[in-house]
Image: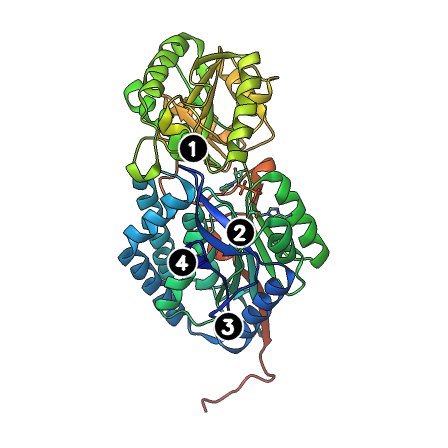
Amino acid sequence: MSAAGLPEHTAVIAGKNVATGQWIDVLDPSNARPVARIARCGPPEVHAAVEAARHTYETVWRFTDPVERSRLCRRIAEVLREEREELARLETLDTGKPLGQARTDADVAARYFEFYANAVESLGGETIQQRPDRLAFTLREPYGVCGHIIPWNYPLQIAARTLAPAIAAGNCCVLKPAEDAPLTPLRLAALAERAGLPAGVLNVVPGYGEGAGAALAAHPGIDRIAFTGSREVGELVMAAAARTIVPVTLELGGKSPQLVLPDFDAERAVPQLVEAITEHAGQNCSAGSRLLVHRSVHADLVAALAERFAALRIGPGAEDPDMGPLISAKQRARVLGHLAQGARDARVVVGGKVPEGEAYAEGFYVEPTLLDGVAPHHRVFNEEIFGPVLCVTPFDTLDEALALAEHTTYGLAAGVWTSDVTTAHWLAQRLRVGQVFVNDYGAAGGVELPFGGYRRSGIGVEKGTEALREYTRCKTVAIRSGSPAPSAPC
Ligand code: NAD
């Protein structure tokens, strides 16, 4: 505890709590008050964490039976489930998201460990047909030490998403959580230890991006880097990885389109279109932030959405409203900047400002906002806002819809709303995005569904069995048989 009575969280290196003497306050986004302090790590702590991970990998983890790794991951899932409510409340306190959404995050985090516990048991290479006197096969081997840098929007889910396949596959990890929401990743490390994970398999170095994050990305002892966050920082991480020649996964931003055709099912679509942009106040990489709607149904759909947006309950996450605050004052200022520009370029149908009233005075709230008549040359059409802002653009033809969808440089996800399977298929084939949902939107946890951006939304894949392959590399073994071949049974 700090002198002010705040819980203090240090780095976790080789199973030990390591303080740095410097602290960062963690704020509750619903009222801007500090709720905890985390150690501010820098290059020395990152170096110690990488060394600890290396030592554990070389002496313990790489020789662990996959069945044992699987058992430990399943045990971690069980412990996460036992602590579901505590984790959810911590996530809400830290990120501001509604409690119901945080409970889902805790469930999904447990599912990641369970899924990779199962998947690793059937991980294997292949045999290769070659000359009769040669036996050739491939092995899937762990990389060794993986660095993981994660953002603040889904800290618990994303920590589990990136750590579970890496650990199950036999890697040791150094995790750098986001400075704005580090509490559940730190708690996850403590719970993993309680589940029996050997010290040093999972090390956590909280701190700022320029300090701990940059040191981790550039560390020569790292064999692989997984980064989830903004495109700008993704570029820096990739440049650092280029200097040490290590593979990177980059899970970056998006500006995901929802394409609504005249024959769509409004009853099914409308609630999901709203949820896709208001879940965690739109701070979601695959938020459905652009609505591309056929002109024949445009006016009715905008009216239906406006009604829903206006009825959404906004409030502190702990009260489980429809929408909580944004993560920080900085993020709110960013979103409000986009809204000011959007109001100059397009028509604000509903929302567009900070909600009025005493209840919203201290937290980082913004109204859910519908902008209509957004054109492809507008900034809000192209840039990721990362807030509860839906940009509406009408179209007349399927080709035009596709061109609008492709107009941004992102390619994370897309939704297609139509009753015609041929149209759905035509669009799903052509959209340059990593995930296409038809008459549905969002992975809803989607632990089993591979997820990775096309174009500037990233490189590589997380989730599903694909991720297990990403955290292993391929070694080929070719064995020449003796000559002459044995003629009699021994
Ligand atoms: P961010 O890029 O600012 O920060 C992400 C992480 O990188 C944080 O831990 C931060 O401390 C660290 N960091 C910052 N500077 C660094 C540096 N120079 N070197 C190394 N690390 C550094 O992103 P954010 O604001 O935390 O998150 C929002 C972004 O994340 C959005 O663009 C969103 O779309 C994206 N995101 C993508 C996915 C996905 O799976 N594709 C998921 C969630 C969020």
Label 2, on which residue? 24
Q: CA distance from mark 2 to mark 1?
A: 20 Å
Give residue 362's mark: 1
Give residue 254's mark: none
Q: Amino acid at mark 1?
A: Glu
Q: Amino acid at mark 2?
A: Ile
Which comes before the other along the chain, label 4 or label 1?
A: 4
Q: Nearer the viewer, mark 4 or mark 3?
A: 4
Image location of residue 146, percent across then percent down: 56, 60
Let me know if residue 163 appears in the view: yes
Q: CA distance from mark 2 to mark 4?
A: 19 Å
Q: Residues within 10 Å of mark 3 (few under 14, many from 20)?
A: some
Which residue is rendered at x = 69% and y = 52% of the image? 240
Which comes before the other along the chain, label 3 or label 1?
A: 3
Q: How many numbered callouts?
A: 4
Image location of residue 64, percent across then percent down: 45, 74
Q: Is residue 437 left or right of residue 180?
A: left
- Find numbered disc 1 in the image and state the secondary structure of the residue it sits on: loop
Which comes before the other along the chain, label 2 or label 1?
A: 2
Label 4, on which residue? 188
Q: Amino acid at mark 3?
A: Arg
Which comes before the other along the chain, label 2 or label 3?
A: 2
Q: Residues within 10 Å of mark 1 (few under 14, many from 20)?
A: few
- Find numbered disc 3 in the image and state the secondary structure of the residue it sits on: helix
Quadrant position of residue 130: bottom right
Q: Nearer the viewer, mark 3 or mark 1?
A: 1
Q: Name the residue at the front extreme.
A: 3
Label 3, on which residue? 62
Q: Residues within 10 Å of mark 2 (few under 14, many from 20)?
A: some
Q: Nearer the viewer, mark 4 or mark 1?
A: 1
- Find numbered disc 2 in the image and state the secondary structure of the residue it sits on: strand
